[in-house]
Amino acid sequence: MQIGWQDVDRWLMGEAWVGSRLQEHLVALCEEIGPRWSGSEGERRAVAYLLAEWTKAGLSDPHDEAFEFDTWEPGRAIARVVGEEDWAIDALPTLWCPPADLAAPLVDVGYGMPHELGPLRDRLPGCIALIQGGFEPFSPPRPFPMRLRDLAEAGVRAAVTPSGKGGRLLNFIPTTDWRDLEGCREAPMPVVQTSSEDGARLARRAGQGRRLFLEVESAFRRGASANTVADLAGDVWPGEHLIIGAHHDTVPGCPGGLDNGSGVVVLLEVARLLSLLKRERGVGPGRTVRFVTFGAEEQFLQGAFAYVSRHFGFEKERISHRSTRKGAETSVSPEAWPRLMLNLDTLAAGPMKGMALQFPELRAFVQGQLDTMRQGLRCHVIAQMDATGDQFPFALAGIPSGMLWRWRFVGAHPDVGFGHSPADTLDKVRVRELKEYVGLLSGLALRLSHAPPEAWPEDRLDTGEIVARVKAEVGTVFRTM
């Protein structure tokens, strides 16, 4: 099939700008529906909205795929300095924080580095630690989850960590390393975040030998969530497919404009453009493009893990350490493996710069496709296994995967600091940048769909080697460049 790529690119970029529904989708998801913590009514309304949009776009077989998952229900968090009960200290439980009800001496441990804990070892058992979450300047970096485990091993009962942002802004943050496949859901102790302003005041109280009362209400239970799935069938190799995905859930109380309303609305628009291009210009994808939104991403990627289990028979609890990807595909996979899984997460963090792959096998191939677009887009390979997005379960299974922009990358807009908070509203999203994402990503997806099978490098990804790599990287500092 001969495609006039210049004409197609012109049409895609024009429609991405002139016919855009990005703002409409953002209003629906972030304001009319609002927070979408998985298992909540907000998420159920979001799933219904997405299914309706897949149908409206003319995609085939739009459906949801329900799954049960482990979830966490946060309640109130209260922190009071004993003797200063009139001071209402800013407090927010960290993600998956266990309940707490205690009063104990408050000890300022600085960054919780080994050289700081040594002189305090006699004061740590039974205390509540005040710990800075960022890296200690100039010292060898030690991740926050590792420092929390050091405190737990020293007998600390709970911790308070000041936000690194001013203005009393609080964000839901994790306290575990999601690369820890066995222990990522087990918080080392109750940890609450306080504002930077109250953190500075608490440091002064710790220096006075004061006690802190801490109460956290939370509960753990089983919940119900769903992924949504829809296809745009390929015209040449319909049995092969690409996956483009984005998570539709948010943290509690968060409208999710940046994270991840921006990724979901771009996904919806790419689906609309490619479907409309096929209807109006007769140019469809060569291989099938599957659009997926995932639930429970903010809860240890459980929606993506459910998808990989359902479609490819891959369970992270039962990993073969000897099977190659191709061998696993023929032995346990219920369906064909995708050529590539591309994750869209927090795209509003910055303009599109290209693609970051988890594995190097497709680097030259993808760069070649980007070069045909003549927009200076680059393909890079992430130095470590990235467990903070829905591409991770696919990568664990040996499926080539990648992402566009991520919130950690250098050069992100300052507004990204409002993520995981009630201030993550749709006004933080630069819609014009997302229009560029839609046009460019549509062109890239179409090119990848038309690359003949023989043009794709034969990958040799061994799941055992991948899992061993993940385990070896637990506790290391993740590179952002």
Image (tube, rainbow, N blue to C red):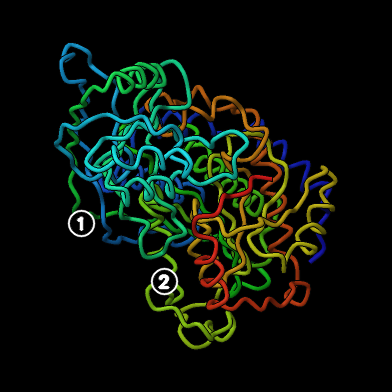
- The residues bearing labels 1 and 2 have C-alpha atoms spaced at a distance of 19 Å
Task: Please say if the residues under marks 1 and 2 sit with CB atoms less than 8 Å apart.
Answer: no
Above or below, 316 against 103 in this view is below
Camera-nearest label, 1 or 2: 2
**Left or right: 130 with respect to 141?**
left
Q: Nearer the viewer, residue 380 or 155?
A: 155
Q: Quadrant of residue 309?
A: bottom left
- According to the picture, the residue beneath numbered tag 1 turns out to be 222
Residue at image coords 69%, 40%: 352
* Element type at mark 2: loop
Estimate the x, y position of residue 354 in percent, counting from the top left. Answer: 72, 47
* Count of labels in the image: 2
Residue 33 seen in this snapshot = no
Q: Nearer the viewer, residue 350 or 122?
A: 122
Kind of residue indicated by mark 1: Arg
Above or below, 329 against 119 in this view is below
**Left or right: 319 with respect to 454?**
left
Residue 437 seen in this snapshot = yes
- According to the picture, the residue beneath numbered tag 2 turns out to be 316
Q: Quadrant of residue 318?
A: bottom left
Q: Nearer the viewer, residue 28 or 147?
A: 147
Q: Quadrant of residue 353?
A: top right
Disc sitting over residue 231 in the figure = none
Estimate the x, y position of residue 83 in percent, counting from the top left. Answer: 15, 15
* Element type at mark 1: strand
**Left or right: 447 with respect to 126?**
right
Q: Quadrant of the C terminus?
A: top right
Q: Residues within 10 Å of mark 1 (few under 14, many from 20)?
A: few
Above or below, 137 against 372 in this view is above
Kind of residue indicated by mark 2: Lys
